[in-house]
Amino acid sequence: MQRDDEVYVGHMLDLSRKVASKTAGVRREDFDRDENLRLALAHLLQTIGEAARRVSREYQKAHPEIPWGGIVGMRHKVVHDYMDVDEDVVWKTSVEEIPRLVAALEPLAKS
């Protein structure tokens, strides 16, 4: 593993925990009413994707339990198609996928 891989995986974990923290106890209706939360979550998902994009191919291949392509794809969607970002996808990713990502990243960040 390259040193940079450790840094990026740790960054992905930190950012994912922030998403989980920001959505803890939050209902979809709260998300819909809170523009700052919507913007923050989109930005955090974008940044998680940017960190994932920088993880080496070798490391990605060694850890297929992480959905690298989907994470990077979300980053591309937020960055390049920012006018059509689907808030349903941001919400679902934040509350359903991010907790799974945290659980998958935790053992990697400890090694």
Image (cartoon, grey):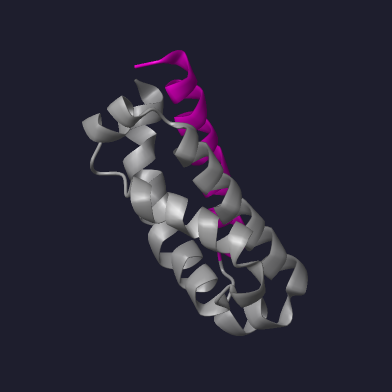
Residue 83 image point, x, y percent: 66, 74
State yes or no: residue 9 in magenta: yes
Q: Is residue 89 above or below residue 65?
A: below
Q: Quadrant of residue 28?
A: bottom right
Horizontal side, residue 53 vs residue 79: left or right:
left
- Of residue 84 and residue 105, the one placed in the foreground of this image is 84
Q: Is residue 34 above or below residue 70?
A: below
Question: Count the marks: how many?
Answer: 0
- Of residue 37 and residue 79, the one placed in the foreground of this image is 79
State yes or no: residue 11 in magenta: yes
Q: Residue at x 53, y 69 (%)?
A: 90
Q: Residue at x 55, y 38 (%)?
A: 14
Horizontal side, residue 101 vs residue 14: left or right:
left
Q: Quadrant of residue 78?
A: bottom right
Residue 44 image point, x, y percent: 61, 52
Q: Residue at x 65, y 55 (%)?
A: 43
Residue 4 image point, x, y percent: 49, 20
Q: Residue furthest right?
A: 36
Secondary structure, magenta segment, majority class: helix
What is the magenta range? 1-24
Q: Is residue 89 above or below residue 23?
A: below
Horizontal side, residue 94 vs residue 62: left or right:
right
Locate the C terminus by quadrant: top left
Q: Is residue 52 above or below residue 109?
A: below
Residue 19 image point, x, y percent: 57, 55
Locate the N terminus by quadrant: top left
